[in-house]
Amino acid sequence: MTQQVQPIFILPENAQRTYGRSAQHNNIAAAKAVADTVRTTLGPKGMDKMLVSNLGDVVVTNDGVTILEEMNIEHPTAKMIVEIAKTQENEVGDGTTTAVVIAGELLHKAEALIEQDVHPTVVAKGYRMASEKALQILRELSFEIKETDEASLHRIATTAMTGKGAEHAKEHLSTLAVKAVKSVMEKAEGKIIVDKDNIKIEKKVGGSVEDSELVEGIILDKEKVHPSMPDSVKNAKVALIDCAVEVKSTETDAKIQITEPNQMQGFLDMEEKIIREKVEKIAASGANVIFCQKGIDDLAQHFLAKKGIFAVRRVSQSDIEKLARATGGKIVSNLHDISADDLGKAGLVEAKRVGDEEMTFVRECRNAKAVTILIRGGTEHVVDEIKRAVEDSIGDLEAALTVGKVVAGAGATETELALQLRKYGQGLSGREQLAVNAFAEAIEVIPRTLAENSGLDPIDLMTELKAAHDRGEKTAGVDVFAGKAQDAWKAGIIEPLKVKLQAVSSASEVAIMVLRIDDVIAAGKQDSGPKMPPMPNGGGMPDY
Ligand code: ADP
Ligand code: MG
């Protein structure tokens, strides 16, 4: 008698499940697809991508994290890879493509091992060992950098901008980035702190990239409130106010009954008196410029203008705070208390037309702890991409200064790292050694891709590069312009150690996590549409 085998269902009907090899294969394929997307953008000769949203908005960029964020990726494993780029962006601000490309390659190499029947957990263990060793080797390969070393800071900023839309003006822009970072840099207990929030980046379409400038102070996207106020104020004494310069409106709806015409006049006179007093208070403090977070009444505008005071209203809270850091002023909440001590200083405050918009420049603040970089460029897409490049270089400068360590770029550090990892692998047992070697090969994806993206033969170049490292030339990297190996350090291609540490550690963490998955259970998509009511008689044609 044959027994009937009943299948057992433990999952809802529309759930999808893949397991074993096929789950691993799918996951790795998804990760590789993400890495391949951004791979062609890596390095000075990397290409750009054009992304068009469903609303028709266009973004042209070379920036890894921007590409991945705009792509709206859905596959769960692919999303995990996108997370690497986001972490990299938040922690360092640069190296997003590098991190994603390494993760993709780690999984690609792992797949080859799995196909040779090395169990995924063995690969995962080997990868974990290799990644710990890699972080240690990277630290050993780094050089110290001091904040006084202007030339090197400049090179870090330029390296970050190479190959972006900002390429042709990178000298000018990196000067701005270095100056900005050095202005806001602070030292506490011997440690350097750079708060990127104190560097405001404003963009205005128009002019050329070379017209971009650093303002030691703040640029506001606002105009003065009254046309007869002065256009510029030298030696400005700046009042920062976070209450309104108006007659207080009553909290509840009050009704004022006026029965005679002179009562009306009395009422208006009263209002005028209050406003006049407020303006007098401001003037008495010695302020000749005010920035107000709230509104400024028409009448107050008129009185302020008559006194020659420059005023801007409805300045955002974050800008008021930045103004306080830039000018050294205190934010005043009650006009009755305002005094000369509360005022900040700026060499020049001016109203200026940039492009087709009126803006206010607060310049020449001495020891400004908040600064602004104004980015100019031919079109919206150009200024956006330049802003991203400048942000990358500011991130790199921060990472270099706060950690105080840098490494050679152009694939030099990755090549040396791979070489040393292989040496480390020699002391391990067979299968772990295989995994460590695979890890080393995966790291070499960086110099290989730099060569590929420059139209060079990756095999020739890698052979030359490895030979140089075998001879002990630890900083030999890719010269993408001459198509051969060169000393990247001497060529001034410098990157912060932190970029490499973060890229290697997050890429390997995610690769290991993906490798350990052997079962993917996906709940079916929930039906969001309205449910049809059940048809009588089980649907179909009615019985007659
Ligand atoms: P990421 O998003 O990873 O920062 P990038 O497109 O900025 O990607 O490329 C960074 C890579 O380009 C780094 O490996 C860096 O060393 C390399 N690189 C930068 N400038 C040069 C150069 N002049 N020659 C060769 N490689 C360079
Ligand atoms: Mg970069």
Image (spheres, rainbow, N blue to C red):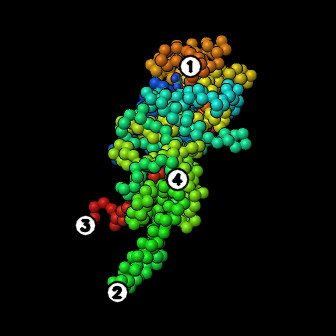
- In space, the residues marked 4 and 3 are separated at their CA atoms by 93 Å
Label 1 vs 4, first from the N-terminus: 4
- In space, the residues marked 3 and 2 are separated at their CA atoms by 87 Å
Q: Residues at badges 1 and 2 in contact (C-beta under 8 Å)?
A: no
Residue at far left of view: 544
The crowding category of the residue bearing disc 2, from other C-alpha atoms within 10 Å (few below 14, some 14 to 19, many at least 20), is few
In front of the other: 493 or 514: 493
Residue at far right of view: 427
- In space, the residues marked 1 and 4 are separated at their CA atoms by 47 Å
Can you tell which of label 3 and label 2 is closer to the viewer? 2
In front of the other: 385 or 31: 385
Q: Can the viewer see residue 25?
A: no
Give the amino acid type for the residue marked by disc 2 in the picture: Glu
Q: Tell me the residue that label 3 is attached to.
A: 544
- The response on whether ligand 1 sits within 8 Å of label 1 is yes
The crowding category of the residue bearing disc 4, from other C-alpha atoms within 10 Å (few below 14, some 14 to 19, many at least 20), is many
- The response on whether ligand 1 sits within 8 Å of label 3 is no
Q: Can the viewer see residue 482?
A: yes
Label 3 vs 2, first from the N-terminus: 2
Q: Tell me the residue that label 4 is attached to.
A: 237
Can you tell which of label 3 and label 1 is closer to the viewer? 1
Residue at point 64%, 33% (across, down):
147
Picture coordinates of residue 109, whole percent (x, y):
58, 27
Residue at point 48%, 59% (across, down):
292
**Element assignment for label 3:** loop
Q: Residues at badges 3 and 1 in contact (C-beta under 8 Å)?
A: no
Q: Tell me the residue that label 1 is attached to.
A: 491
Q: Tell me the residue that label 2 is attached to.
A: 260
Label 3 vs 1, first from the N-terminus: 1
- In space, the residues marked 1 and 2 are separated at their CA atoms by 86 Å
Give the amino acid type for the residue marked by disc 3 in the picture: Tyr
Give the amino acid type for the residue marked by disc 1 in the picture: Ala
